Image: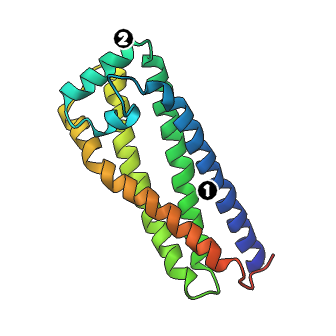
Amino acid sequence: MAGRRELNLKRAFLWTWIGGLAAFAIVIMLSLPLVLTAVPGGIADHQAAGSAAEVDRIQSAWQAAGLYGQARIAMIGDLIFIGIYGFGCLLGGRWLLQSPRRLVRPLGAAALVAGATFLATDYAETISQFLQLIDRAGDDDLAGLAATVRPIKMMAWLASFCVIIAALVLDRNSSRTA
């Protein structure tokens, strides 16, 4: 029974985490049109804006290029990606904590921490961005929040990805039930 539960957790983790990576690729594709001469970093410039004035400048450029709706779609896609990928990291962390390999279990704990940090910071960032987008006006507090959590989010995403890949490599030859 425990082996079956472990297999179900592994399956749920892999489907969710890989699904999150696929959602990430879709979000990148949805965000590409937002790269303009006036906004060379596209959505990343909006994330890092840091002030209402900069958010207003970016959103005005998107509006002038007829891309306001595309920005909305890209941010909604980002909100969906965050949930799928972050939940996949949490599932992966839980599954890896059960590994018979001693070296893998701490990586499971790291995946849990990185996944939870990613979920919290990326949702804070993207919700802050989205609120400004739907209000059609920058807000210093929201722009500041998004810019502040952005580097933490990026490190959490990178850590979660690398930790899970490393754990999967280390765990591949374990004696788990197939």
Q: Residue 64 carries which label?
A: 2
* Residues under numbered marks 1 and 2 in contact, where contact means CB atoms less than 8 Å apart: no
Query: Neighbour class for label 1 at 10 Å: few (<14), some, many (≥20)?
Result: many
Q: Is 79 placed left or right of 140 in the picture?
A: right
Q: In which quarter of the image is the C terminus?
A: bottom right
Q: Residue 40 carries which label?
A: none
In this picture the colour scheme is rainbow
Q: Which of 157 and 95 is in front in this view?
A: 157
Is 32 on the left-hand or right-hand side of 41?
right
Quadrant placement of the N terminus: bottom right
Residue at the location (37% across, 38% down)?
Answer: 44
At a point 71% along the width and 83% down the height, the residue shown is: 174
Is residue 2 depicted above or below 118 in this figure?
A: below
Q: Is mark 1 on a helix, strand or loop?
A: helix
| Residue 46: % across, % down | 33, 33
Q: Give the residue type that dot 1 points to.
A: Trp
Closer to the camera in the image, 137 or 166: 166
| Residue 96 on image: x %, y % | 59, 75
Above/below status of 70 relative to 64: below
Residue drawn at x 32%, y 21% as measured from the top left: 59
Instruction: Check disc 1 and report the residue beneath it.
Output: 17
